[in-house]
Image (cartoon, rainbow, N blue to C red):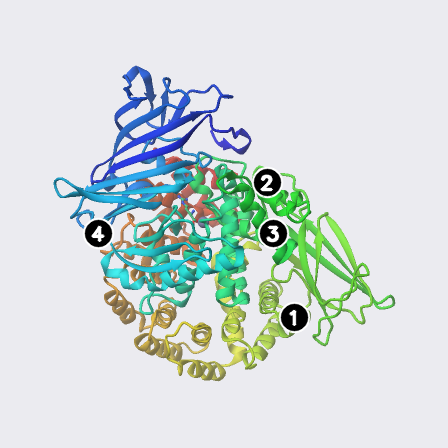
Amino acid sequence: DPIRLSDYRKPAWTVATVELDVDLGIDASEIAARLTLHRDPAQASPLRLNGEGLELLSISVDGQPLAPADYRYDGSTLEIGAARDGSVLETRVRVRPAANTALEGLYLSGPRETGFLLTQCEAEGFRHITFFPDRPDVLARFTVTLKADRERFPVLLAGGNPAGAGELPDGRHWARFVDPHPKPSYLFALVAGRLENIERDYVTGDGRKLKLVIWSEANVIDRCHYALDALERSMRWDERTYGRHYDLDVFHVVATHDFNMGAMENKGLNIFNAKYLLADPDSSTDDEYRAVEAVVAHEYFHNWTGNRVTCRDWFQLSLKEGLTVFREQQFSAEMNSPSLKRIEDVSLLRRAQFPEDAGPLAHPVRPQEYREINNFYTATVYEKGSELVRMLAGRLGTSGFRRGMDLYFERHDGQAATIEDFLSALGDANDIDLTTYLAWYAQSGTPRLHAKGLYDAHKREYTLTLSQQTHATAGQPHKQPLPIPVKLSLFGYDGKALPLHLDGHAAETEKVVVVDQATQSFVFRNVASAPVPSLLRGFSAPVVLECDYTPAELALLVTHDIDGFNRWEAGQQLATLAFENLRSTGDTAACSAWCEALSALFHNPAIDDALLADLMTPPGEIEFADRQSEVDPAKIHAQRQALQHRLAQHLGATALLDRYQALAAHTSQALDADSQARRRLKRRVLELLALLDADQAHALAAHQYQNAPGMTDRLAALGVLVRDRAPQAAAALADFRQRYADNPLALDKWFSVQAQIPGEPALATVMALENDASFTLKNPNRARALLGAFASTNPSGFHRVDGQGYRLLAERLAQLDALNPQIAARLATAFNGWQRLEPIRREAARAALKELAQREGLSPNLSEIVANVLQR
Ligand code: ARG
Ligand code: ZN
């Protein structure tokens, strides 16, 4: 049965203090726990603790060992009759880290001889380590003592402040950690093994001296410096922007190659997927550098938004995740380029979240029910959640939002809070009622915002009518209007923004109107000529905008909008119009307008290279598919290629080649914005040139591959060769394979780039790569690099008309599920959207899913996704 938000009850039993004594071993570890318990006098329920598959060695209450009749343990819940308010419960259990392939709880990273032990507890992993009320609203003070063989486990780490260490007989040692801040069990962590570190002193703005320490296995420790710099930047930024300081004497960060997610904000001991911590020019792309900076910041920011103020229950997940993504996006925008960051964020939202909202996996940012909470770490909770915070922040303005955040921290520090608490704090601090925004958290589906403008030359009035509609989603047949902030400007045909006269307010060129009914009209007075509206500026709300622009109007915005994001957005709309007209009526007017506008920008020296590269990239295949009612991914791929071919033709081989060579003259691997921008544009220009003159582009790519000063250029060149199956591809792939034989993160890219070959050849490529000696389903990064890249990012390769892509994925999901249910469930979301496929593919996908659903013994994780994808 699902767990429902409406069933929430306060915990009947809480834990004031917990002392853990962990005796570490690779095959078996023993955990002794001592909990001081408190009972809510208003509730009568007996003590029930979570404990998943634990081998119980001993149990006592208030010093009295319990007889088997005194408790009941069914493998997931431990019920004890004898406990009273104030009782001390002591348990001792054994767990098996090396056998833990689910990577949840205590597990081994790397080979048993040399690897290290670590934990992952969010959301419900702590119950795989010891008996506990494993829910986020039980906050306890943790004291953790680790004991282990000194030679095998020289480094012992747990969250909190160090509180002693020493020798034990038989070559063993111990270390103790006390965390002064009460925390929920999901923020517990330990790490033990042979690790190296780099460290730095840090003094917080409020005078606390501490050490920042990054840990990794010895062979990659010199790739941690960028992350350490990023950590320091994040800490300063949070002090400056939100007045939030760090609160322990040490901050540890650990890298592992075996991790289900990106990273985890465990109190004082963050644990990272190495993919988001290690960075060096030879093996990381520019995009990966930015991802490291963003994830380091994200996890650090959780210390306040997540840890000091945590979630009451897992339905509130977006309270910490949406808010922390928003803070991370603000930080990244400041560290890099705000408009490029916004383009990146909106693209991700459209690629990952819009399809979620439009299909059978749709759920509100605050879900109403779930079976397996790990399935709800979604783009909706994270990315759409961030957009909701952004709307609130926009509504309050910079200082109003800061006031609201201050009040939120003041009220809820040390507590487990709700989304209502958040909205009340933001609202109360500003004397504004924000409760209408709660509907955004409760309603799933992406609103469509339709805009229609009417100009009355006689009255010199422009009336903008905005209507909103949200399609029914699973479990939500009827939708209500939401408050949609629409930031807008009006442009004259000379390309200048007009002063806006609305409701008699002073004239500005940009305004925000809020649409909170099904249809509303806004009248602008004193408008000299029919304007072109620039709507939803900065993507002021997570909606799909429908506006019947002419190609010329969009071209005007592409050419004249001074804001980088809006210029890009107008270009995306124009490219979409071009794409749709070409495929439906063959009308080329929009395509010509798009090509001409881009050509002008291409030859405009004032425009930033990175922005130009993004402008020259039409929406992706997934975004185009999202707009169609019957999807043929092979056709979409071909039509999108054709669109790009027209752009390439319009620009011309000579201009593209000249530009490529001018960009290639810069060989610096520096990370400054200009160098990154040049690399980004160089890649785009090479891709377009390859559409016109394949031989020449492939020769250039082969040369670029061989002489690349760093990974960005090397991978870009490899991508062009592999995707085109150029004659030079095999040699480059062989070189890459050998060059990075000992670098799993780089090797993941070798798998991904091949899994992304478009169309027919992808399947055979993937199947051949599965037989590569370095392929394994046991490592999440590797499984994602091959199967995830194939199924989720290569529509024309995966969605084969013969259904073989679906059958391959279903088969691997079943295998993977036996090892790691979280990863299997995540990869299964690639089936999302199958109902809108054209009939032949639709039937093949349905059959593969049905067959998978009927298999015996699927995990709750995978069955929930498969059932939801199939039935709803
Ligand atoms: N809280 C982590 C983050 O967003 C993600 C952990 C997700 N873990 C999971 N098992 N779903 O930074
Ligand atoms: Zn997070």
Give the CA distance from mark 1 to mark 3.
36 Å
Image vertical order of residue 120 relative to residue 644, above or below: above
Sooner in the amino-acid sequence: mark 2 or mark 1: 2
Q: Nearer the viewer, mark 1 or mark 3?
A: 3
Sooner in the amino-acid sequence: mark 1 or mark 3: 3
Cβ atoms at labels 1 and 4 below 8 Å apart: no
Q: Residue at x 57, y 75 (%)?
A: 598
Cβ atoms at labels 1 and 3 below 8 Å apart: no
Q: Nearer the viewer, mark 3 or mark 2?
A: 3
How many dots with numbers?
4
Disc sitting over residue 403 in the figure: 3
**Where's residue 702, x and y in %?**
33, 76
Residue highlighted by disc 1 = 557
Cβ atoms at labels 3 and 4 below 8 Å apart: no
The 10 Å Cα crowd at callout 2, few under 14, some 14 to 19, many 20 or more, is: some
Residue highlighted by disc 4 = 194
Sooner in the amino-acid sequence: mark 1 or mark 4: 4
Check disc 1 and give the amino acid type: Leu
Q: Residue at x 64, y 62 (%)?
A: 537
Residue highlighted by disc 2 = 420
Sooner in the amino-acid sequence: mark 3 or mark 2: 3
